[in-house]
């Protein structure tokens, strides 16, 4: 009789600990693995800044999606123009991202971030904007940066300033 009670208690304990747990959706798993949208946006900005600080064309190019690289004929030249424009080394950056997510039954099918940051170097203050496809289940070749743009704060403050990067693949620069 004692053995039956012990076995029964073990079975009940096992069911309570794991058997009845609610399974985590893929979207929640991705969020746990990748972090919050702000963390994702900050991580991408860190990678952009590292490439800019190091003057590394290949590092910046590697952040772009396969589709963006196919669509932009002169990507290396665009990146080199930005690297020539960029002055100094990062002291700090601050910003945030807006997001757009398409889900199906709780799973992220598409997730896009549009980051907007102030980047301060020891030589200049810049505004950086980018479009980043985090997840695209239907077309994984779209995952990565679609576009980015960098301008000085003085250019950004002009009355008629408008971003050029939105929905256009490539690297944009306004002087």
Image (cartoon, rainbow, N blue to C red):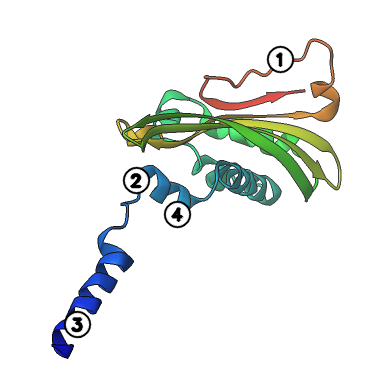
| Residue at (86, 48) in percent of width and height | 122
Are the residues at dot 2 and dot 3 in contact (C-beta closer than 8 Å)?
no
Image: 100 above or below 7: above
Q: Nearer the viewer, mark 2 or mark 3?
A: 3
Is mark 1 in CB contact (under 8 Å) with mark 3?
A: no
Please identify the quarter of the rendering in which residue 108 is found.
Answer: top left
Q: Which residue is under mark 1?
A: 162
Q: Nearer the viewer, residue 168 or 112?
A: 112
**Residue 33 shows which numbered tag?**
4
Look at the image and tell me in which quarter the N terminus lies: bottom left
Disc 4 and disc 3: Cα gap in Å? 41 Å
User: For the residues marked 1 and 3, what is the alpha-carbon distance in whole angstroms?
Assistant: 73 Å
Give the mark toward the camera: 1 or 2.
2
Which circle, 2 or 4, is nearer the viewer?
2
Secondary structure under tag 1 reads: loop
Front disc: 4 or 3: 3
Question: Is 13 displayed left or right of 98 in the figure?
Answer: left
Helix, strand, or loop for circle 3? Answer: helix
Q: Earlier in the sequence, mark 2 or mark 4?
A: 2
Is residue 87 among the parts visible in the rendering? no
* Label ID, residue 5: 3
Pointer 1 or 3: first along the chain: 3
- Please say if 90 is above or below 21: above
Q: Position of residue 37 (x, y in %)?
A: 55, 41
Q: Position of residue 172 (x, y in %)?
A: 63, 25
The x, y position of residue 103, in whole percent, is 37, 31
Precedes in sequence: disc 2 or disc 3: 3
Q: Position of residue 115 (x, y in %)?
A: 62, 33
Residue at x 66%, y 47% (from the top left corner): 55
């Amino acid at each position: 009789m004692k053995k039956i009670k012990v076995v029964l208690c073990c079975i009940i304990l096992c069911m309570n600990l794991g058997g009845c747990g609610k399974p985590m959706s893929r979207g929640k798993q991705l969020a746990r693995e990748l972090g919050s949208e702000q963390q994702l946006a900050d991580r991408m900005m860190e990678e952009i800044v590292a490439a800019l600080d190091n003057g590394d064309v290949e590092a910046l190019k590697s952040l772009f999606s396969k589709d963006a690289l196919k669509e932009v004929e002169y990507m290396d030249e665009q990146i080199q123009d930005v690297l020539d424009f960029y002055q100094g080394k990062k002291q700090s950056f601050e910003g945030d991202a807006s997001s757009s997510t398409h889900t199906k039954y709780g799973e992220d099918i598409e997730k896009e971030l549009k980051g907007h940051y102030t980047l301060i170097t020891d030589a200049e203050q810049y505004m950086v904007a980018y479009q980043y496809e985090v997840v695209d289940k239907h077309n994984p070749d779209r995952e990565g940066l679609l576009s980015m743009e960098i301008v000085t704060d003085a250019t950004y403050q002009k009355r008629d300033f408008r971003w050029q990067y939105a929905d256009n693949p490539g690297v944009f620069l306004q002087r």
